[in-house]
Image: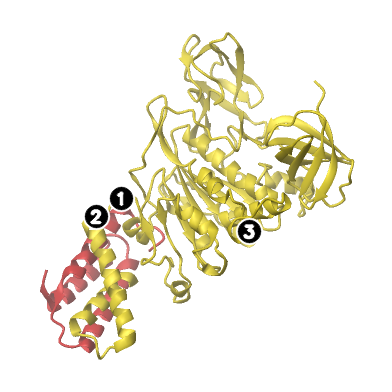
Amino acid sequence: MNKRIGHIAEINANMVTVGLNDFVIQNEVAYILHGTQRLKAEVIRVRADRAQMQVYESTSGLKIGEQVEFSDELLSVELGPGLLGQIFDGLQNPLPALARQCGFFLKRGVYLEALSNTEWGFTPLVKKGEHVLAGSKLGFVPEKVFKHYIMVPFGLKGALEVLEISAQARRNIKEKIAVLKDQSGKLHDVFLRQSWPVKVPIQAYAEKLKPGEPLITKMRLIDSLFPVARGGTYCIPGPFGAGKTVLQQLTSRHAEVDIVIIAACGERAGEVVETLKSFPEIIDPRTNSPLIDRTVIICNTSSMPVAARESSVYTAVTLAEYYRQMGLNVLLLADSTSRWAQAMREMSGRLEEIPGEEAFPAYLESRIASFYERAGLVRLHDGSFGSVTIGGAVSPAGGNFEEPVTQATLKVVGAFHGLSRERSDARRYPAIDPLISWSKYKGFIDEKKENDGHEALRRSYEISQMMKVIGEEGTSLSDYIEYLKGEFFDFV
Amino acid sequence: MDEATSQERQIYIFDFIHDILLSGFKLEDKEKALRFFQRLRQLLRTWNSSAWMSAEFKQTEEEISILLEENRINK
């Protein structure tokens, strides 16, 4: 079938308008043909015979009239064995392989397959004639310390009959391992890998449940006073230098989860390098393997194309949902969602949309909400449970939590760990301010004792404010002792 | 220690500290109160850095308990 071809009609930084006398699919991926280069882009608005696209590369040198080839596909990720321990960019290109090919400076228009064509030892779990559903486990391959389950493609509907299933054998990701027949009689080949569009949640589970069990981060301040639930959501807003990234890195190392997905979205490259250097050295005490073996890093640093920030958070959450489908507990750490919001603002300005507060798009809240909504605890069709917990760092300008991104995030998350410049300057780490932070989740500390702790801190703060006016001399001994108790509790 | 504290240790320490928060102390003046809580802080810092249920952990816990008992009015 011939590909649909359009032509560039306008160029505005990383937004390109394409004229096309044919249908266009919203969020469809297209490639701008610039000489020998193919630059990936995504349709973000369609108006009559014009499609506006955000380009995931620099548009320097593009010309009016150049051809654009539409792919019939949405922006998707490859899901299969070989993801763990990998470092990808926002478009799921493996960065080490890109570096080997291009050198230190990545070239635009170079895209590599996310999964290498390695052979894996496949073991079937179903037999010919059995009936399965989307997301059901057909077999597994061992990957690192996990059983990587090969599942029925998530997009298939209804009950499917297993017509063929591979015997226990070594298979690569391009070899067929099963054939399924759906209720209309159509046959579907299944491989070790499958593809899924990043902006569509994976919903091949039986039920979504309310998060209850605490997720143990092993950080006392969080677990005792501001717990996070497995399958829940939390945010870490904080000013520059307050320690958001360090806090997320520590959480990623020690939290009691199976898989950690780190989405470095628009942040400093140096911080990501720190993670890349340290993770292979650190041994996870639960598995006795390098921490990197249970981690996937999606890296879109501040120097990389702005449009790819959005794809990085969606790629990360799709990978997280994929592992949840296997019955694993996944922690997704996004650092930081403010950079994604800034990319949305930039694009919205180019689209000439009516701006909302602080020039962010009017749909900022709904986009942030739809991202955090992909977290959750689910019961799978086989009765097992999996979870995705999402923790997002927020970088409000000047540490002002009243700004739109922080406020939009606070409306949807279940816990708020607000970082304070004063506490970080005083070297009180983690610099979570206990007076402004909160959590809706129950932790493992007795609730009454937790409340007593909160009350001690509040009372101490009130007395300290009073002492600023009347001085220590004007404060009663009993009040002073209450103040010291709160300070003691805060300190230890 | 704050990087990686097990659930068991967190519960144990929190219960211990909660006890302190609810206790009354026979501290005669603000200077004595300040010195008492500073001493308590130092001991907690030592306690925090010792391995869970090690000899050092138990010894420091004993020291803290003695200090509390010497100054506590009631629980």
Residue A491, horizontal then vertical, whole percent: 34, 72
Q: Mark 1 packing: few (<14 Cα in 10 Å), some, or many (20+)?
A: many
Q: Residue at x 60, y 61 (%)?
A: A358
State left or right for residue A36 relative to residue A246. right
Q: Position of residue A166 (x, y in %)?
A: 56, 16
Circle 1 marks a residue in which chain? A
Chain corresponding to yellow in the figure: A
Q: Quick check: marks 2 and 1 in contact, CB under 8 Å?
A: yes
Q: Are marks 3 and 1 in contact (CB under 8 Å)?
A: no
Ranked by sequence position, the earlier of labels 2 and 1 is 1
The C terminus of chain A sits in image quarter: bottom left
- Which residue position holds label 3? A359
Q: Judge whether residue A336 can be spotted in this image.
A: no
Mark 2, mark 3: which one is toward the viewer? Answer: 3
Tag 2 residue: A447
Question: On the rendered structure, is B25 left or right of A48?
Answer: left
Chain shaded red? B
Mark 2 → mark 1, Cα distance in angstroms: 8 Å
Q: Which of the marked residues, 2 or 3, is nearer the chain's N terminus?
A: 3
Q: Quadrant of residue A208?
A: top left
Is residue A65 left or right of A280 when viewed as pictured? right
